[in-house]
Amino acid sequence: MDSKIRYEIEFPINSSPQLLYQYISTPSGLSEWFADNVNSRGEFFTFIWNDSQEKARLASKKTGEKVKFKWVDDASKDTDYFFELHILVDELTKDVSLMVIDFAEKEEIGEAKQLWENQISDLKHLIGSV
């Protein structure tokens, strides 16, 4: 299996960090824009899209700032891959943006970024940031 490459993309979002954090850190918030459904049991989150599902562990969070989900295998053991959603606030302008850190196969990075753009677009519509 090819190793995946880390990439980052930043999206300006017209929202308060507190509101945005609710949408990136809770199963109900994530299921409104990130996946069709999100369930959590303890630190484990199950992300469901159409007929597929992936399981991740909430590896770290800093309230109001960021969440990091580490993908796990069928035995609930951590894999090498994760995705992180980090809320950035410009100190001068107070502009808010969402930094996405994720991994994809080299030839799929363009497609992966496009998928994030679509999902973040859904998030922006949801919170009225368009």
Image: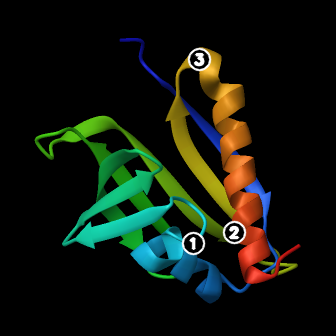
Labels 1, 3: front one: 1
Q: Is residue 92 left or right of residue 71?
A: right
**Which is more N-terminal, label 3 or label 2?**
3
Q: CA distance from mark 2 to mark 1?
A: 8 Å
- Residue at 61 percent of width and 66 percent of height: 33
Few, some or many residues within 10 Å of mark 1 (<14, 14–19, 20+): some
Front in this rendered view, residue 126 or 68: 126
Measuring from the top left, give residue 56's x and y in whole percent. Answer: 31, 52
Labels 2, 3: front one: 2
Check the picture and name the quadrant holding the C terminus: bottom right
Few, some or many residues within 10 Å of mark 3 (<14, 14–19, 20+): few
- Residue at 47 percent of width and 23 percent of height: 4
Front in this rendered view, residue 54 or 87: 54
Measuring from the top left, give residue 32's x and y in whole percent. Answer: 57, 72
Secondary structure of the residue carrying tag 2 is helix
Q: Is residue 58 left or right of residue 63?
A: left
Q: Looking at the image, which residue sits at the far left?
A: 75
- State how many labels appear: 3
Q: Which residue corresponds to mark 1?
A: 32
Q: Which residue corresponds to mark 2?
A: 123
Measuring from the top left, give residue 82's x and y in whole percent. Answer: 40, 44
Indicate how the structure is coloured in the image. rainbow
- Residue at 56 percent of width and 47 percent of height: 101
Q: CA distance from mark 2 to mark 3?
A: 26 Å
The quarter of the displayed image where residue 11 is located: bottom right
Q: Are marks 2 and 3 in contact (CB under 8 Å)?
A: no
Secondary structure of the residue carrying tag 3 is helix
Query: Looking at numbered disc 3 in the image, what kind of residue is underneath it?
Result: Lys
Q: Are marks 2 and 1 in contact (CB under 8 Å)?
A: yes
Check the picture and name the quadrant holding the N terminus: top left
Decide: is 102 above or below 125.
above
Q: Which residue corresponds to mark 3?
A: 106
